[in-house]
Amino acid sequence: MAFLDRIRDMASRDLKTVVLPESDDERTIEAVDEILEKKIARIILIGKDDIRKKVKASGADHLDIVDPLKYKDLDSMISEYYELRKAKGMTPEEAKKAVSEDSLIFGAMLVRRGLAAGFVAGANHTTPNVIRASLRCLQIDKSIGVVSGAFLMEVPHSQYGENGVFVFADCGVNPDPNPRQLAGIAVSSARLFKQLVGKKPIVALLSYSTKGSAEGEMVEKVRKAVERAKEMAPDIAIDGEFQVDSALVPEVALLKCANSEVAGKANVLIFPDLTSGNICYKMTQRLAGARAVGPLLTGFTKPCSDLSRGCSAEDIVDAVAITALRS
């Protein structure tokens, strides 16, 4: 059984409720059919009552359709959202419009209120829109201090990582993280790997240099991030800076950095900037035929997941299963 199929199986053993705000997207409806048929999660779909007619699957007891305008606690939710945003200049009228008309805000507020374990969106919303709703409604994990976008990667027939399973980060949020942010990304990504894979995270911070083989501003940033990450989480195996072959290939690691507990064994890869992370995950996905799920947003106290607007229904199912497990 492939790893992501095992994730779905694990989610089905303890059903959690996940919000899908994009009920107007056909891929979402297709995903809901599969989620209900396989009993992967309970689903809250945000939209009009007639959406239920589109859902073909059985398991109606695991599906709720919620129309924000008919929601019984709408006024209370609007008041809560206004309190969250009034310091930023939001008016009560703007809060009412946001909660009642923006399905992302409404979905994120359901999660904030504990009515769902997490939410998954992005099929027809941009990543900035999904992140904005999350930042406005959910609490930041103060021990991490930065929101980032990780991908769970399953590379077929790979001898590297955890039998081909990796976490890549940050591939979706921070264009040029500073050392403090990069350290937070490393720690949150390690925790995500442990939570989903159940194995020891081995975290490599990547660069064009391996342990002093080159110099430069970007290399120095990674070195400072490694120091900070080790202070934040001394119990996690974190090291760098590494070129990617030094991080993954034991034979190369033996030549370049034999004394590192991470080199040649990494299963969590942390990229120095968004450009390299985004390019690498998409290249791995297309050239190696990898399954890529994410961006899984880390750094919040409750789980939420973004989607690529080019996602498939299967991608949505995987993201829901992972979000359920993360809760």
Image: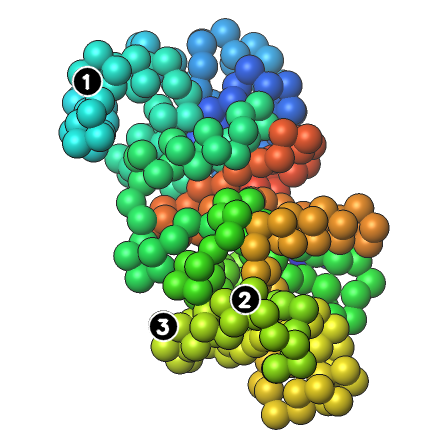
Q: Amino acid under label 1?
A: Thr
Residue 281: x and y in percent read 68, 51
Marks 1,3: beta carbons within 8 A: no
Q: Residues within 10 Å of mark 2 (few under 14, many from 20)?
A: few
Out of 157 and 297, give the one closest to the viewer. Answer: 297
Residue 96 versus residue 174 in the image, above or below: above
Q: Residues within 10 Å of mark 3 (few under 14, many from 20)?
A: some
Q: Earlier in the sequence, mark 1 or mark 3?
A: 1
Question: Which of the two discs, 2 and 3, sits closer to the camera?
Answer: 2
The residue wearing badge 1 is 91
Q: CA distance from mark 1 to mark 2?
A: 43 Å
**Picture disc at residue 217:** 2
| Residue lying at the far front of the rendered structure | 216
Residue 33: x and y in percent read 62, 26
**Picture disc at residue 280:** none
Q: Amino acid under label 3?
A: Met
- Going 52% across and 34% down the picture, which residue do you hit? 127
Residue 226: x and y in percent read 48, 74
Q: Amino acid under label 2?
A: Glu
Q: CA distance from mark 1 to mark 3?
A: 39 Å
Q: Earlier in the sequence, mark 1 or mark 2?
A: 1
- Going 78% across and 85% down the picture, which residue do you hit? 251
Number of numbered callouts drawn: 3
Residue 93 in view here: yes
Relative placement, left or right, of 326 versus 318 is left
**Picture disc at residue 232:** 3
Residue 292 versus residue 168 in the image, above or below: above
- Label 3 SS: helix
**Quadrant containing the N terminus in the rendered view:** bottom right
